[in-house]
Amino acid sequence: TGHRAALAAADPQTAALEALTQQVQQLQTMVQSMQEALSTHTTACCGCAAGTPSPGPATSLAAETGLCATFGDPHFTTFDGAHTILLQDGTFWLVKAQDVWIQALAKTNLGNLMGIAVGGPFMQGHTLVVRNNTHEGGSGLEVLFDGEPILEDRDEHGAAEFQAPFELWAARRTEWHPGLHDQAILDMDPAVAFDVGPWASRFSDAPEGGLYLFKLPGGVELTVTGVDFMSAVLRMAPQEGGQAGYCGNFDSNPDDEFLPPAPDTVPPNLVAAWNTPIGEGLEPVTGAEDLFKLVGANGEPGLVASAEPPTSLAAIAQERKVVCSEGAMRQAEMACEGIPEADMKKACIIDVCVSGNPKAAKGVAAAELMMEEGATAKTVPLFVGHGRCVDDRGMRFRAIRAGAVRNPEECKALLRAAKGFDGVLGAQIKVQGACDLMVAPDVDQHHPELPALSRGSWAHGDADTGGVNYVADVEEDLTWSCWRLARQAK
């Protein structure tokens, strides 16, 4: 110290530097003291003003909680780190536990994530819904608490807050605030690079639709933006008694939460995120368990996904209370063999079993066709399933390719434009691939009745492998989507 003082006396510049160093050290001590005090008292801050940290720092939970993400169509990153995809519409469980019920809603056959609902005993009888209402003509994200909109009264910066009369605090911001939001969200690994941009950009800076944060009972946190339909991250602790759903079982083992895709069915750059979810709690949410129906009962009917009809013969038979012997079932299957569309064939088999008359198959087929396609005489493409289009024998079709058309909506528009041309049977598109039209064997890329392309030109796709007459089913593969064109029955 005496040596530094002597140097300072001899050199004024050194003296100034020494004084600045001491001031910095004093400031660091003060900041550390303030942080410790804030950590002690911040749980009392429930009605915090806009821009200030919310109740309890997120980092205080990091050692005992985990993160689960869902986004897009929809993808999942489970609490244990598995990466899966659903590509399906309906209501499904993210977390299904004794006290905590968290569900998600996907719309359209591509499974676009459009809603998150939170309920269960830990919410003391209340329900929170965050949803993207653009499919109903709305402007973006909205939040409903017990069916009533909240976070609508915003200041000039687009910020809003809400506090329930129990342990629930909600905030809307237009930008990411390091003191408010959970930094660990930005560091999550999405497994692949998605077209919407780097993972952190879904939340950082000023994300589309705003940035919503919900601090719920039991240390559960939910962060949501409107990027990629919706991007949402849950933070919570493992639940006593276990848990299930698409966020996984939270047992620290990702390997029991997915099956990898079959070899060569997914582009190499997507394989890591294209796993099939496995485990408990993956069944669709129906009936009284559907939290979104509570919102529908409060004037939001467009939220609830329509119920899907039974898809297996056993399910159809059970629903119709049909008893069909093994011999009668074989006879019915033979009578209905010529019906091309898979679900209509199932219905035909059941009806023939009920009537006991194999000759009824022809009338049943015509009636089923008119019922299904007469209602869609305006030629709306009908979604067949995820996979390559095939006929009733499982044979693929001749395809012609629109190389510049690389998204499902444009591909369906092409199929719709071909409504007057009997040579076009359906369409299919692969993730990050081009659109194919399924055509009759005598149609090539130069046929004058093919719909015009706004860019690019028609080219050869798959060679003819025997598919004829009708797109009946799919060769199951989650990376493909297949549609057929409904036509007026003649």
Image (tube, rainbow, N blue to C red):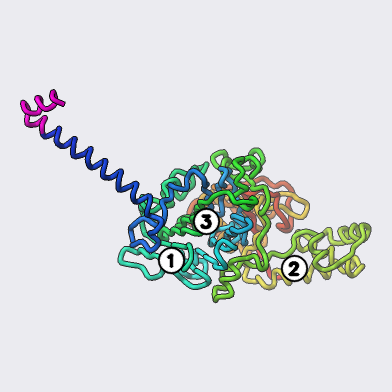
Residue 289, quarter of the rendered image: bottom right
Q: In this view, does 266 lie above or below 127?
A: above
- According to the picture, the residue beneath numbered tag 1 turns out to be 163
Queried whether the magenta region covers residue 271, the answer comes back as no
User: Residues in magenta?
Assistant: 1-15
Dots 1 and 2: beta carbons under 8 Å? no
Distance between mark 3 and mark 2 Cα atoms: 53 Å
Q: Residue 218 carries which label?
A: 3
Q: What element carries label 3?
A: helix
Decide which of tag 1 and tag 2 comes sooner along the chain. Answer: 1
Q: In this view, does 297 lie above or below 281?
A: below
Indicate the position of residue 82 as horizontal and vertical percent values: 58, 43
- According to the picture, the residue beneath numbered tag 2 turns out to be 369
| Circle 3 crowding by C-alpha within 10 Å: few under 14, some 14–19, many from 20 | some
Is residue 4 found left or right of 317 in the rendered image? left
Q: Is residue 444 among the parts visible in the rendering?
A: no
